[in-house]
Amino acid sequence: MDDSRAQRMVLETALRDQDLTILHASTGAEALDLCARVDIDLVLSDWVMPGMTGIEFCRALRALPSDRYVYFILLTSKSDKGAVAEALDVGADDFLTKPPDADELRARISAGERVLAMERALRGNNALLTDTLDRLRSLYDSLDRDLREARSLQQSLLRESEHVYDEGRISLLLRSSGHVGGDMVGFFEISPGVTGFYAFDVSGHGVASALLTARLSGYLSSNSPGQNIAIVATPFGPVGRPPAQVAAALNRMLLTQIDTERYLTLIYAEIDRNNGRVRLVQAGHPHPLILHNDGSFTALGDGGLPIGLLDSAHWSGIETTLKPGERLLLVSDGVTECPNRDGVELGQDGLERMLRGLAGLQGSELLTALIWELGRWHGDDDFPDDISLALFDYGFGF
């Protein structure tokens, strides 16, 4: 752009062999209108003109809405640093002293073309990146919806969070650290007055663990022999398989029928509600606790091997008897291994300290309060691992 037609023709002649499409404008307003209508790559503008100066034109050009960059070369006879700084500040890219040397003019334009080529390549990459991010966002949103639905489905495996019998009450709580998790707790009826009661924790997190959790829950959710791995049909009716044998059967199944590298920890208990007799097995899960009427605790079991690691693994059964008013509590390692802000894990002793402070609570109130106390210990309720709790209150008059 130049108000002198003769000067514009001189510049065009110098660029005739550059394979450029050259457009003319005699004023800043005319040039702005041209830039708004046509995709301009490079502007060569005089500094001093009547009406809109080159500086003002550059400022107005940069203010135009556009996703394309325009390289701006200013022709000037000015040489003081203040003028140069002003031009750079409003968006000029380069300067040429008037009258420009033809070779230097072509060299400066070639340099501008290289900058524009890099800008176009970057713009193309940005467009590709934006498109990829949009696709990923759409995929993430779809996955997030699926995972929320999977969370609801997994929670539905916990058919009842509380169940009341004449002889006692079962309370359950399940909380995943992510959308879905590997913990599960539950119960089922073996025969009149006899209940199967369990908690297990599949290694890992996420979808793979949740799928295995759902499959294993199926083996412990039915009340029918043949469908529930813990119930055996006899001529006299269904009876419970000894808990140690339940662990062994699950171990065989995991190693021979289910193609997975994951393992699980388990507490499985058979509770005779008529007399408080309990048979159980511990397979790598945190120790089950009996909460006595005087506020003391008894930790059952000696640890045991997790299920799904060794085909030669062996488990021993444990037997005890609950007195009326006593409770059997199962917790996952998301509780005992929950760290505080200093990275110190709660541990079995810490769990028992919490329970002493909650001794007056029963059922779901106790489990909810225990989660609240765990959040205080951790510093917030965003726990690093899945949390599952199962409680059997034994007594009469529920």
Image (cartoon, grey):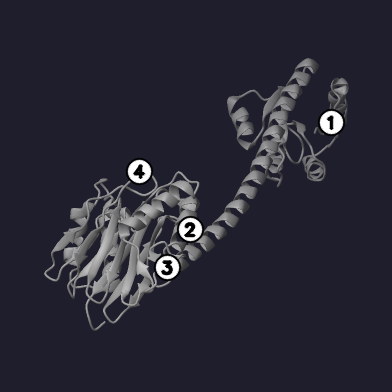
Q: How many marks?
A: 4
* Amino acid type, callout 2: Arg
- Give 95 or 396, whichever is nearer the viewer: 396
Answer above or below: position of 284 versus 293.
Answer: above
Real-space CA distance between mark 3 and mark 1, rounded to the nearest whole angstrom: 85 Å
Real-space CA distance between mark 2 and mark 4, rounded to the nearest whole angstrom: 23 Å
The quarter in which the N terminus is drawn is top right
Query: Which residue appears farthest toward the left when viewing the image?
Result: 294
Residue 326, x across and y down, in percent: 19, 71
**Residue 185 relative to residue 100: left or right:** left
User: Callout 1: 10 Å neighbours few (<14), some, many (20+)?
Assistant: few
Real-space CA distance between mark 3 and mark 4, rounded to the nearest whole angstrom: 32 Å
The dot on residue 312 is: 4
User: Callout 4: 10 Å neighbours few (<14), some, many (20+)?
Assistant: few
Residue at image mark 3: 158
Asked whether the beta carbons under mark 1 and mark 2 sit within 8 Å of each other, the answer is no
* Precedes in sequence: disc 3 or disc 1: 1
Real-space CA distance between mark 1 and mark 4, rounded to the nearest whole angstrom: 97 Å
* Amino acid type, callout 3: Leu
* Amino acid type, callout 4: Ser
Residue at image mark 2: 215
Residue at image mark 1: 4
User: Callout 3: 10 Å neighbours few (<14), some, many (20+)?
Assistant: some
Q: Secondary structure at mark 1?
A: loop
Real-space CA distance between mark 2 and mark 3, rounded to the nearest whole angstrom: 13 Å
The dot on residue 130 is: none
**Residue 291 relative to residue 99: left or right:** left
Residue 12 placement: quadrant: top right
Q: Is residue 382 visible?
A: no
* Amino acid type, callout 1: Ser
Query: Which residue appears farthest toward the bottom when viewing the image?
Result: 397
